[in-house]
Amino acid sequence: MAIAATTAPAANEPPATPIHRLGEQVFDAVSEIGDVASFSVQTIVWIFRKRARWSVLTPIFYAIGVNSVSVVAITGTFIGMVLAVQAYHQFNMMGLATRLGSVINISIVRELGPVLAATMLAGRVGSSMAAELGTMRVTEQVDALAALGVNPIYYLVVPRFLACVLLIPLLTLMADFMGVIGGAVVSTQIMKIDSFAYWKHTRDFVESLDIFAGVFKSYFFGSAIALISCHRGFNSRAGAEGVGRAATEAFVVSFIAILFLDFLIGMGWNTLYRSLWPQSGTLI
Amino acid sequence: MSQPAAPNPSAEPIIELRNVTMRFRHQTVLRDVSLQVHRGQTLCIIGESGCGKTVMLKLIIGLLAPTEGSVWFAGRNLAGLNARELVEVRLRFGFLFQMAALFDSLTVYDNVAFGLREHHLAEEKAIGDIVIERLREVGLPPEVQHKKPAELSGGQRKRVGLARALAIGPEVMLYDEPTTGLDPIMSDVINELILRTQQTMKTTGVVVTHDMKTVSKVADRVVMLYPLPRLRGGESQMLYDGPPGPIENDPDPRVRQFVRGEAGERLLELATQRAAREEATSPR
């Protein structure tokens, strides 16, 4: 973990050439990757090395999980509703309006539910964690923990990591559920699609494995959000600008990681699915 | 008014820095610094901002590892200790941070009880008694225990920070600019508390400060560090190491200027810089 020297004077150094600067950038990039990897390994090790206390876990679980329910639910609902509005006319022109349920719901449980729940978590919780830990870093609270013989990763990162990993599947299910409800309300109550046909096609098309695939991905998204955000916070630079930048970077890097992981897991899962059931289509 | 305890030069060194160099990327903060602190001694480290005083404190408690050289505590090289041994060593220190570094999310009670709880050093009932006792020792009423750090004044925060550091019964107290940002009255209160702590708890003290009133009140030895970029070639970074009495008449003008708070050659530097700027911007 890098420790920022905020007050150290500059020693007399020869002026840097472009080659020097390029070398430094490569060195920084490699060092950053190594730093994140080391940070992640330490977090995993501390989960098993010493059990986190409930008094520490509970408020963090509440802040990350319970306080995210409303924003995830609202997002999920509107995504379902928008999907119904956008897809209805196309399907209706082809006389397939009753098939709308299968398209909306498979999109939600496979992709939109997990990705949007993770994006909302990264935006609401990831930035907040980075800002909080960044402030603790620059006000020496992280050093104070270490000086009191408490490992900052154990005390600050492990509870946030556990909260993100354990609660994001529930938030994903919440986004899925609300998306399904939102889509169904618009389709059956506003677009007047036959309710029985809507749900029948949904049941025929959406399988438990689809829901499982979305929830499975969310574990990876939650891990990435927690590790990236906490790492950014721990390496925040001094001052309001440094903390603000850490919060922004936490969201941006987490978001890119979510999309990248989504692609990677989708590819991996499809390969696995096709090898197990060669006659079937792709899963994700 | 109380006087500092007389130094005991025959006592074994409890803290030792051997040829320590500390570098942050391109910035060398400390260069080849060697220092011994004896048991029962109160050492004040003075010097301009950015000369490496705080870095030295963090090296002593193992929050930073030296780039070169070694740091020893009670005859043990900190670099040779495993994580558990390092925690054991840190529990023999109390650290008062510059801005107190109280944990924002915890109450005063929980802050002071933190070390005791985390390391199971006492039962909850006994912890309550210790917290009240430590708060009383630093002149705070029991009612303050329910407040959050944000509700406290600067002086109260420093005192709670001192109570937290003292709660675990340290052998060595490290103070990082204990009077910075406080009014003269509160500064004197903090100085008196430091002095009383050294006397009643028989702790060894290392005080980083640029407040000469603190030095004259609590120190029985003073070390003055000088910023590396300003040193002449080959000079030691420690410009002064001795008792506080003669420092005001030290033959080195840089030491005298610091003690008397005189800008000295800095004014000349400012004038030279201003002249250079004006020459660069003036029309030819």
Image (tube, coloured by chain):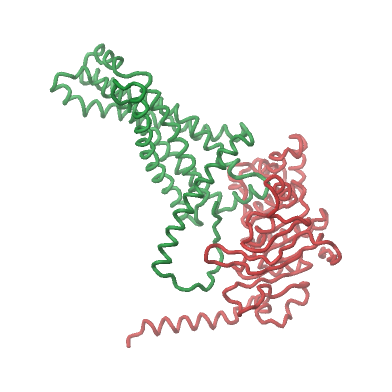
Chain colours: A green, B red
Tell me residue A50's x, y (percent). 64, 36
Q: Nearer the viewer, residue B54 or A201?
A: A201
Tell me residue B134's x, y (percent). 75, 47
Left or right of B97, for residue A81: left
Q: Image point 50% across, 72% down: which residue? A: A13
Tell me residue B74's x, y (percent). 78, 56
User: Hey, which residue is sitting farthest bottom in the picture?
Assistant: B284
Left or right of A45, for residue A192: left
Tell me residue B104's x, y (percent). 58, 45
User: Hey, which residue is sitting farthest left in the picture?
Assistant: A93
Q: Nearer the viewer, residue B164 or A201?
A: A201
B176 above or below A212?
A: below
B127 above or below A111?
A: below
Q: Image point 63% across, 69% down: which residue? A: B31
Q: Image point 71% across, 70% down: which residue? A: B223
Left or right of B245, for residue A26: left
